[in-house]
Image: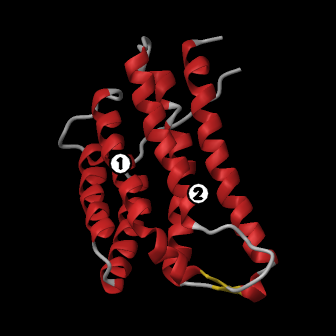
């Protein structure tokens, strides 16, 4: 087993659980859709966190290229970053219930403080991982963009304004799309 395989097994499990959770929650809520009152901002966040987990999994491949030597501190730091992704995917949608109406707008605003604190932790730790583990310079999109969006997440955690949340939700979605477009990783398969 290579160091890359050893390090990424647990990381892949965390991200796999995050994706499983979000896919299951969407499926469960779809089954009871007659009792679910949707909210566009919540739906936008479902798309954003799904893309975030998938993109992060894609980015793990860089570990096979950039990291020959690992220590426990680096591994712990990476696991904390990935765990934050799992935690905010569990908050973005409520559990489907056997009875009663599920209002996704009410759910969004009831969990927004914890959700955005965890998003901010994830973003700030992403900047640190990109800088410290992947050797990205401070003036690169991989360090600057998560830091900027992390500051917006802190604002969303302390702000209750629906207008602010709507603007920040769209802003963060667009920033995430732009961030993905800066990715230059190419995975080649050799027999």
Q: Quadrant of residue 155?
A: bottom left
- Whether residue 109 is visible: yes
Return the x and y of residue 152 as percentages of the image width and height: 27, 64
Q: Circle 1 sits on which residue?
A: 121
As helix, strand or loop, the secondary structure at mark 2 comes to helix
Q: Residue at x 67, y 55 (%)?
A: 21
- Mark 2 vs mark 1: which is more N-terminal? 2
Q: Which residue shows up at 24% across the image and 43% down it?
A: 140
| Label total for image | 2
Residue located beneath label 2 in the image: 90
Crowd tier of the residue under label 1, counting other residues whose Cα lies within 10 Å: few below 14, some 14–19, many 20 or above: some
Residue 52 visible (yes or no): no
Q: Residue at x 29, y 36 (%)?
A: 128
Picture layout, residue 9 above or below residue 55: above
Q: Nearer the viewer, residue 27 or 178?
A: 27
Is residue 147 placed above or below 57 in the rendered structure? below
Relative placement, left or right, of 128 versus 180 is: left
Q: Position of residue 88 (x, y in %)?
A: 50, 56
| Number of other residues with Cα within 10 Å of mark 2, as a class: few under 14, some 14 to 19, many 20 or more | some
């Amino acid at each position: 087993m290579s160091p890359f395989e050893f390090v990424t097994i647990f990381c892949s499990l965390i991200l796999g659980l995050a994706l499983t959770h979000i896919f299951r929650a969407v499926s469960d809520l779809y089954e009871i859709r007659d009792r679910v009152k949707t909210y566009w901002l919540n739906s936008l966040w479902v798309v954003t966190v799904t893309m975030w987990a998938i993109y992060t999994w894609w980015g793990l491949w860089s570990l096979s290229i950039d990291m020959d030597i690992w220590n426990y501190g680096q591994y712990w730091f990476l696991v904390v970053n990935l765990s934050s992704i799992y935690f905010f995917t569990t908050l973005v949608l409520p559990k489907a219930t056997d009875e009663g109406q599920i209002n996704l707008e009410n759910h969004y605003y009831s969990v927004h403080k914890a959700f955005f604190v965890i998003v901010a932790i994830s973003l700030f730790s992403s900047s640190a991982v990109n800088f410290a583990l992947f050797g990205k310079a401070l003036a690169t999109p991989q360090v600057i963009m998560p830091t900027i969006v992390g500051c917006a997440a802190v604002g969303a955690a302390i702000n209750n304004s629906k207008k602010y949340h709507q603007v920040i939700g769209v802003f963060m979605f667009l920033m995430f799309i732009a961030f993905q477009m800066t990715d230059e990783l190419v995975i080649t398969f050799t027999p």
